[in-house]
Image: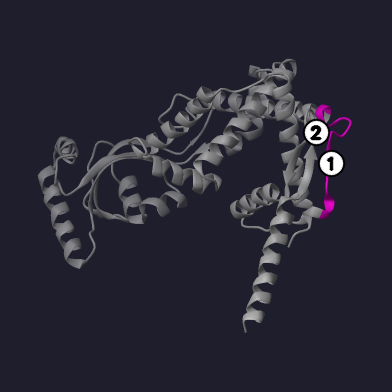
Amino acid sequence: MKKILLITLFITLTSVSAFSQADLQPAAIVNLTRSEPITVRQLRTEVDRLQAASGQTLTVDQRKEVLDAMINERLVLQAAARDRVMVTENEVNQQIQQLRAGLAQQLGRQPTDAEFAQVVRTQYNMDVQTFREQLQRQLIVQRYLMTKKETLINSIRTPTEAEIGEQYNLVRAQLVRPETVRFTMIMVPYGADAAARTAARQTADKLHREIGSNPSRFDELVARSVAPNSGYQAGDAGYIPRNQEARNVVGQPLLDAAFSTRQGQVSNVVEGLQGFCIIKVTENHAQKNLELDDIFQLGTRITVRDYIGQAMLSERQQEILVQASEELVAELRAGRPFQIFENNLNWQ
């Protein structure tokens, strides 16, 4: 029995060792300024991350595309180091802070380190340190591209009024703003059981009686919602269009109430998706075919002209960046300063 156990253990250890050695074999070697291997493990890690994000298994040809992208990045990073193009830790920190600020805006408060780490894990499928290292590499690649292809990138033209007008005529049939309403809402959450729901209804009815026929009383109750143990929540619901997506978000009864209540008036108690609601409509907007000088997105100052111009400029910028990237990569790959080991890409 001991002999069998030793043989089994030897076979297991041999298998693990073989697997580890295979993982450490090179998938490619980049040698623009120095010899830098891309190991099978590094490639598999990136492939696994992409597969987890897409929910699909990559083919061998797709693995080669991932490897090509990794080679391109290594070539640019080596060239950047050679030409002394770098990014400081402080610049990386600034990018991280911008991301945290965006999350803070969503949460209404500063995120904890654990919350930020969870967002990075969910969106990018990596830990914060790995994300930070990748961010630094991306910033170096961007800076090097801007340095080497500055003339091409600066050649991007801002769309003219004539070009914007021509584009508007092509898409004007699609530029229809649906009937839209904006309202402030008081909501009493349903609670966890039937008794809590009954109590919530009683609270909502009481609040509605307090408002009576005086809409200004509604605003007073909104202000009181922040008091400790007020028993209800209140706030601006934003702009709600009359469409299927809005119905899924707020529920049909609340949507019906919003579009049947006049501006400045207060609704009856309505059953929402999460609680009993009372709303006061603050804006009504009829369906409209948008002209160039109309506001494209309610609540902003962005006109249709602005939106089309920005979209056209963004498209041109993207096209030039793709061209610049392709030119830079072609220049760095000239002479093939890398080697790919095809036999190491066929893992199961």
Residue matched to label 1: 339
On screen, 289 above or below 47?
above
The spot of residue 215 in percent (x, y) is 17, 38
Neighbor class of circle 1 (other Cα within 10 Å; few <14, some 14-19, many 20+) is some
The answer to which of 289 and 160 lies nearer the viewer is 160
> Considering the image in quadrants, where does the C terminus appear?
bottom right
Of 27 and 227, nearer the camera is 27
Question: What stretch of residues is rendered in magenta?
Answer: 331-343
The reply, left or right, for residue 206 in relation to residue 318 is: left
Relative to the observer, which residue lies in front, 252 or 62? 62
**Mark closer to the chain start, 2 or 1:** 2
Q: Give the residue at mark 2.
A: 31
Asked whether 333 falls inside the magenta stretch, the response is yes
Asked where in the image residue 198 lies, by quadrant, the reply is bottom left
> Do the CB atoms of the residues marked 2 and 1 lie less than 8 Å apart?
yes
Q: Going by the image, does 244 lie left or right of 329?
A: left
